[in-house]
Image: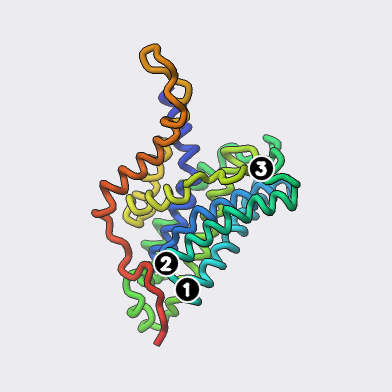
Amino acid sequence: MLAQLLASTLRVSTPLIFAALGGMFSERAGVVNIALEGMMLLGAFGAAVGTLVTHSPWLGSACGMGAGILLAALYGLFAIRLRANQIVAGTAINMLALGLTPFLCKILYDVTGSTPPIPIDQRFRTAPLYLSWVLVLVCWVWMKRTPSGLWISFAGEHPEALNAAGIRVNRVRWLAVLISGALAGMGGASLSIFLSSSFSRNMTAGRGFMALAALIFGKWKPVPTAIACLLFGFAEAVQIRLQGVSLLGSKPIPVQFIQILPYLVTILVLAGFVGHSRAPKAAGTPFQRE
C-alpha cells in the first residue's frame, strides 16, 4: 500500500516538476509567469494531437513543447516587448488556452470534450518521470555553474548591472520565457500521454497554479521546488486513494470533499510560507534599455 502510494506520488508530481522548473526560469529572469496553466493546457493538447499523428510519444511531446513555446512567445510579446502588466497578460494567456483547445478539438475531431484515445503502446510508461528528475539536476547545475544561468539570475535580481556588463537583459528574458513555455508544454504532455490516454478539456485543473505555488515554496530554487512538487503530488495521490473510502462503516466520504485536498494543501502552504520567500527583486518589472 505504501509503495503504491509513493509510486503514485512520483507519477502525479511529474507534470508539476516540469511546469515549476519552467516557471523558475521565467521568474528568476524577472518575468512573473502565471500563464503556466495555459501553457500546460496547450502543451497537453499539442502532445495528444502530435502523438495521434506520428504514433510516437517522443514526437508528440516535442509537439507539446512546441505548443508551449508558441504560447510563451505570445506572452513574451506582451510582457517583454510591449511591457504590459504581466499578471493581466498571464491571465489572458490562460483564458486563451482554455477557449482555444476545445475550439481546435472541434475543428480536428468534431468534438469539444477530448481527443480520440491514444493506444497504450504509443504512450509513455516511465520516461517522463525519470526525465523530470534528470532535469532537476541539469537545472541546478545550469543555474549555479554556467554563465547563462548567472545571466538569468541577474536579469531578475540586478538587470541594470547585467545591462552594464554588455548583456541584453530583454534577450535573456526572452530566452527564459521560451524555456518556460517548453517545459510547461512538456508538463502538459506528461498529463495527456503519460498519466492519461488522451487530452480532455481543462485537464490541467489548476496544476499550473500548483506549480507556481511549489516554485514559491521552493524559493525559486530547483531542488526545493521539486520537493515541494512531491508534497503536492502526495496530496493528489492521497485524494485518489481516498475516493470511495468510508470512515468507521459510515457512508463514503463525498468525492467533492476529497477532490479539494490538493488545492487545500496548496492554500495552506502558500499561507504559511509565502511570507518567508523572497521573489527576485525585479520580478514583474519591465526593463527598458536607456
Q: Is residue 62 visible?
A: no
Element class at badge 3: loop
Where is residue 139, by image quadrant? bottom left
Q: Where is 233 relative to 26, above or below?
A: above
Q: Which one is closest to the eye, mark 3 or mark 1?
A: 3
Q: Which image quarter: residue 257?
A: top left
Task: Specify which label sits upstream in the sequence, 1 or 2.
Answer: 2
Question: What's the distance in space between the residues labelled 1 and 2, CA to CA?
Answer: 8 Å
Few, some or many C-alpha atoms within 10 Å of disc 2 (few <14, some 14-19, many ≥20)?
Answer: many
* Amino acid marked by disc 1: Ile
- In this view, the residue in front, 186 or 137, is 186
Which class describes the residues within 10 Å of circle 3: few (<14), some (14-19), or many (20+)? many
Q: Secondary structure at mark 2?
A: loop
**Alpha-carbon span between mark 3 and mark 1:** 33 Å
Q: Confirm or deny contact between disc 2 and disc 3 (CB under 8 A).
A: no
The answer to which of marks 2 and 3 sits earlier in the sequence is 2
Badge 3 is on which residue? 114
Residue 184 lies, in percent from the top left, at 52, 54
Write down the residue under mark 1: 80
User: Would you say 110 lies left or right of 175 here?
Assistant: right
> Given the image, on which type of amino acid does mark 3 rest?
Ser
- Look at 63% across and 50% down and name the residue there: 45
Location of residue 180 with respect to 257 vertically, above or below: below
Q: Is residue 52 visible?
A: yes
Q: Are marks 1 and 2 in contact (CB under 8 Å)?
A: yes
Q: Quadrant of residue 258?
A: top left
| Vertical placement of residue 108 versus 181, above or below | above
Q: Position of residue 6 (x, y in %)?
A: 43, 31
Q: For the residue marked with disc 2, what is the amino acid?
A: Val
Residue topped by disc 2: 31
Q: Residue furthest top?
A: 249
Q: Nearer the viewer, mark 2 or mark 3?
A: 3
